[in-house]
Image (cartoon, grey):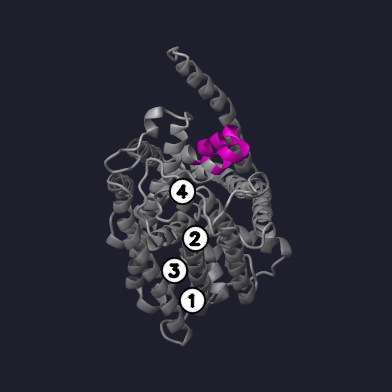
Amino acid sequence: MVAPMPSPVPTGPYVRRLGIWDAAAIVIGGVIGAGIFRTPASVAGRTDSTTGLIVLWALGGLLTLAGVLSYAELGARRPQAGGTYIYLREAFGKLPAFLFGWTMALINYPGSIAAVATTFADYVCSALGLPLTWVKPLAVGAIAFLVMVNLRGIRAGAWVQNIFTVLKLGVIAMLIVVGLVLAFGHGAPPPPAPPLPTTSPFALIGALLPVLFAYGGFHYLNDLAGEVRDPQRVLPRALGLGMGAVALCYVLVNIAYLAGLGHAGLAASQAPAADLMERLFGPTGRTVIAVGIACSTFGYCSIAIAGGARVLQVMSADGMFFRAVGRVDMRTHAPQVALSVLGLWAVILILSGSFDALLDYTTVGEWLSHAAGIATVFWYRRMLKDEPSPYRVPGYPWVPLAFVVTVVCVILATAIDTPANAGMSLLIIALGVPVYYAWRWRESRGAAGVPPP
């Protein structure tokens, strides 16, 4: 729904240089990383029918679309860098916003960058036949390169992202074609697979978890909203276009896996994309898909670095982290200090090998932030009901409510499945409370002219 008189669009220190195709590429690239090349095997192992498997992926896409539509309204209302941090700060106050930044910008974003950069390096070594001792240097080099590109501004980062989004869509198209070719009897026969167990209703709920995780990452565009041209029109369209493309790709890729490997074969596979390619092209197929997955993960890292740095910059400009990190270079209009800090922290996590534990520990926190972010839609509708909104989520309040309820169920299921990780996630969030008050105390002393101890 488009209002005739949109509210003024704040500019801030950033320059609006991203068009609709750049923005849609950010959505696609932020969601499609390495998950779709591995996750379908886990989902297939928890289902006992082809129809059930496809329905789960379609349902996951619809549920995620509910979140995307809600984020579209939030982005149109507040088209500023920082995304969820901005919405939480305005709706619920600085403490919830800080806890989001504490968990995401300082832990989850760098942890995911480190993990995906390592996955990129793993596939590069596999494709080129390099020893595993090259993994860490390649991962560090990838992060350093992407940070340097983004230091030149959002336009340079967008060029890299657009190229790798096209490449990852090409890889997915290749998988779909290979699956169809195999479905018509070409290539080597699939190896025998064990029979699938009967699926219980609880197993189906569990199977939805990895599906939803594979659809995660759509929030990165809102982190970069301060650099989108005509954001009140472009943001909703790019979010819808990008997420629609992702859902279509995911369903078609799963159909290709089923056509080429069979349901039981997919469930038994450790690397379904590689197994699918190997059936038609032999060992060369595995090399080709390794290159493709490396391109996909490289593109994701570029988006995560750009988006995470904007959240860290806005949080620091708010006085919630070192003020120097909140600076934006007036020549490149890039948060150069925040980019460097985020990249350096991700490199430290790679060298220490601690990123896997961090990601496990912050999964619940990440999904809590999604639920809290969407919940601000209700606050805006109630408290600022007279504020003109150029886009309103259709089906309100049921669409955002469906997403929030789904996310709460995901959190509960995750807590039941891995209580230790869920407990650590909540502990990390709770530790942010004393840090917040300590930081506020430090800032108040600085404002009063008292040097920090």
**Could you tell which of marks 1 and 2 lies nearer the N-terminus?**
2
Point out the frontmost of discs 3 and 1. Answer: 1
Residue assigned mark 4: 9
Is 57 placed left or right of 204 in the picture?
left
Tell me how far mark 3 sits from mark 1, CA to CA: 10 Å
Tell me, yes or no, if residue 110 can be seen here: no
Is 280 placed left or right of 444 in the picture?
left
Identify the magenta region. 87-104
Residue assigned mark 2: 239
Q: Element at badge 3?
A: helix
Q: Element at badge 4?
A: loop
Q: Which amino acid does label 1 sit on?
A: Ala
Point out the frontmost of discs 2 and 3. Answer: 2
* Residue reaching furthest to the bottom: 184
Q: Which mark is residue 36?
A: none
- Depth check: 306 or 344 in front? 306
Q: Which amino acid does label 3 sit on?
A: Ala
**Could you tell which of marks 2 and 3 lies nearer the N-terminus?**
2
Q: Which residue is drawn at 58% across and 45% down?
A: 369
Q: What is the crowding at mark 3: few (fewer than 14 residues within 10 Å), some, or many (at least 20)?
A: many
Q: Residue at x 51, y 79 (%)?
A: 259
Residue 144 falls inside the magenta stretch: no
**Could you tell which of marks 4 and 1 lies nearer the N-terminus?**
4
Q: Residue at x 49, y 43 (%)?
A: 108
Residue 64 in the image: x percent, y percent? 58, 60
**Could you tell which of marks 3 and 1 lies nearer the N-terminus?**
1
Residue assigned mark 1: 256
Q: What residue type is labelled 4?
A: Val
Quadrant housing residue 324: top left
Q: Quadrant of the N terminus?
A: bottom right
Q: Element at badge 1?
A: helix
Q: Which mark is residue 273?
A: 3
